[in-house]
């Protein structure tokens, strides 16, 4: 391992330490806020002041005609029915059942029971007025062992779901992989194995054959960075590894899998559009020192350019490759032609935005804004504007969709049957206003998906965090529109904020 890689590791450790700091310990002062506006390698234009809620409430912000108002979920987080209809085991079954891995030992065995209640959930989506629904397909439902012939009952479930969406006038957006790798493939090396990227392309081709005539938009891999960082650097997501050298080889194989799936869609001749789903973090220097600017640049490489440059420019960022070093497993694992595959032309880019990152001269991170219940999430709506405009500026006018944005709030079902999640309304309004500003400034943003449609299994946080527009009363599985759902329905109906 190179010296530089070790330095990078220290930065990772600093990031997780920061994420563990209690929410009260916010480092926000006028002086540090001013410093945050210093121009960085990853910050486009002139950063505006945080949104003023009263101002955004007073003005009507009209969205483009046919804007794709949406909401998002993922298979393991909502479906339950973990052992039904031939579904195989995934790494998240293994991980969540292992002692001490998730809060309260929660698993996705039942989750929101969407597998059985999907028809009711489709009606709720219609009542909400959704125009687009982003869901993911469970690989172990389709190929229980990660390879070979498709499990017909698994395919049938998604066919019913997709048909139900069309019947209600909602456009399906299907994510091929949202972290639930078949356990058998993990046993064979998981994403450290190049072979798994080829298995993924075969799985994708199966779905293009089966559903290609009725799914207009496919997303390849959800947040490869989270698999790298949470799954292989910090180890608090499946498969629970702490191995930096493996982590970046995994990054390369996830990118390769993405590119192979894009090629599989083209080979299939299906009409659908396809792209990756990246969680992007605008990175800002924590102060105006040259050291902070330099550290921020490299941090941005690991957070954003590693994924964006490879998929959209056909090259990995030189600074990141140099930092990893020539002996790293990733650098050694890149073969001739891989970058051509990874940069196979895509139709759209899915952006997921939750939080900014403030980087110090030593490569650590600090907080600048209040956090949500998810202590890693600083609430900074202007980061949405910055990341959307930055992508358009640096990568050209590729169509964009926001496929995740939201926050967890301490929601309570009151005796009168209401859930007053006013914090979520404020958050979504401010982030949508920032997205609107980006559209006004020329960003080709075509849709926006709230994370999430339903309360669900929030990975290592289990069911403690509620991210949904719709409340799930887990003991009864009753669904209740929160105040934010009523609000969002009106926004959709008005096509305006
Ligand atoms: C994203 C994940 C999604 C959910 C939200 C809160 O990173 O893609 O499944 O956990 O965070």
Image (cartoon, rainbow, N blue to C red):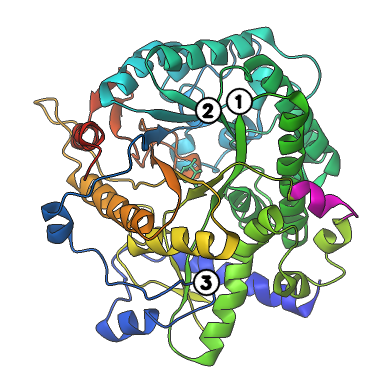
Question: Picture coordinates of residue 266 (x, y %)?
Answer: 74, 31
Dot 3 or dot 1: first in sequence order is: 3
Q: Which SS class for mark 2?
A: helix
Residue 138 disc label: 1
384 sits to left or right of 160: left
Q: Earlier in the sequence, mark 2 or mark 1?
A: 2
Q: Quadrant of the C terminus?
A: top left
Q: Is mark 1 within 8 Å of ligand 1?
A: no
The residue at the far left in this view is 416
Within 10 angstroms of label 2, few (less than 14), some, or many (20 or more) residues?
A: many
298 or 480, nearer to the observer:
298
Instruction: Pinpoint residue 55: horizontal percent, then vertical percent.
Output: 14, 60
Q: Residue at x 58, y 80 (%)?
A: 295
Dot 3, crowdedness within 10 Å: few (<14), some or many (≥20)?
many
Can you see residue 468?
Answer: yes
Front residue of 268/327: it is 268
Mark number for residue 77? none
Q: Give the spatial CA distance, label 2 vs label 1.
A: 6 Å
Q: Which residue is mark 2?
A: 75
Residue appearing at x 66%, y 70% in the figure:
9
Image-based side of 266 in relation to 16, left or right: right
Earlier-in-chain disc, 3 versus 2? 3
Distance, label 3 to label 2, CA atoms, is 33 Å
Q: Which residues are magenta?
A: 335-342
């Amino acid at each position: 391992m190179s010296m530089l890689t070790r330095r990078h590791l220290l930065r990772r450790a600093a990031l997780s330490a920061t994420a563990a700091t209690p929410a009260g310990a916010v480092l926000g002062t006028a002086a540090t806020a001013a410093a945050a506006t210093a121009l960085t390698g990853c910050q486009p234009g002139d950063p505006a002041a945080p949104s003023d809620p009263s101002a955004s409430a007073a003005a009507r912000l009209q969205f483009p005609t046919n804007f794709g108002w949406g909401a998002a979920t993922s298979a393991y987080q909502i479906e339950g029915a973990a052992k039904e209809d031939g579904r195989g085991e995934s790494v998240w079954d293994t991980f969540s059942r292992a002692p001490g891995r998730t809060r309260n030992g929660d698993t996705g065995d039942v989750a929101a029971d969407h597998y059985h209640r999907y028809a009711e959930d489709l009606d709720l989506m219609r009542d909400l007025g959704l125009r687009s629904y982003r869901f993911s397909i469970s690989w172990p439902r389709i190929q229980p062992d990660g390879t070979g012939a498709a499990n017909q009952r698994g395919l049938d479930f998604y066919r019913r779901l997709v048909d139900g969406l069309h019947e209600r006038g909602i456009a399906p957006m299907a994510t091929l992989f949202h972290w639930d790798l078949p356990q058998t493939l993990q046993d064979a090396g998981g994403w450290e194995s190049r072979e798994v990227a080829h298995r993924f392309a075969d799985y994708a081709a199966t779905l293009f054959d089966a559903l290609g005539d009725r799914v207009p938009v496919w997303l390849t891999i959800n947040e490869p960075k989270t698999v790298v960082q949470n799954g292989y650097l910090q180890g608090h997501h499946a498969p629970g590894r702490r191995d930096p050298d493996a982590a970046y080889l995994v990054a390369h194989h996830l990118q390769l899998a993405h590119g192979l799936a894009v090629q599989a869609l083209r080979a299939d001749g299906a009409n659908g559009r396809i792209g990756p789903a990246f969680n992007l973090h605008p990175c800002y220097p924590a102060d105006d020192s040259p050291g902070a600017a330099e550290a921020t640049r490299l941090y941005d490489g690991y957070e954003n350019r590693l994924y964006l440059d490879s998929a959209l420019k056909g090259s990995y960022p030189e600074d990141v490759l140099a930092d990893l070093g020539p002996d790293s497993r990733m650098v050694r694992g890149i073969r001739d032609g891989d970058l051509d595959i990874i940069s196979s032309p895509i139709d759209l880019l899915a952006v997921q935005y939750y939080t900014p990152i403030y980087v110090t001269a030593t490569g650590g991170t600090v907080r600048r804004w209040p956090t949500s219940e998810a202590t890693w999430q600083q609430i900074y709506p202007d980061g949405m504007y910055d990341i959307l405009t930055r992508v358009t500026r640096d990568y050209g006018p590729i169509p964009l969709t926001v496929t995740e944005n939201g926050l967890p709030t301490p929601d309570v079902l009151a005796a009168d049957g209401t859930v007053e999640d006013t914090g979520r309304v404020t958050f979504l309004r401010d982030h949508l206003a920032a997205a609107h500003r980006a559209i006004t400034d020329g960003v080709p943003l075509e849709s926006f998906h709230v994370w999430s449609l339903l309360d669900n299994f929030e990975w290592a946080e289990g069911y403690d965090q509620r991210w949904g527009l719709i409340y799930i009363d887990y003991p009864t599985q009753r669904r209740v529109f929160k105040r934010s759902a009523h609000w969002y329905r009106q926004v959709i109906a008005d096509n305006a904020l």
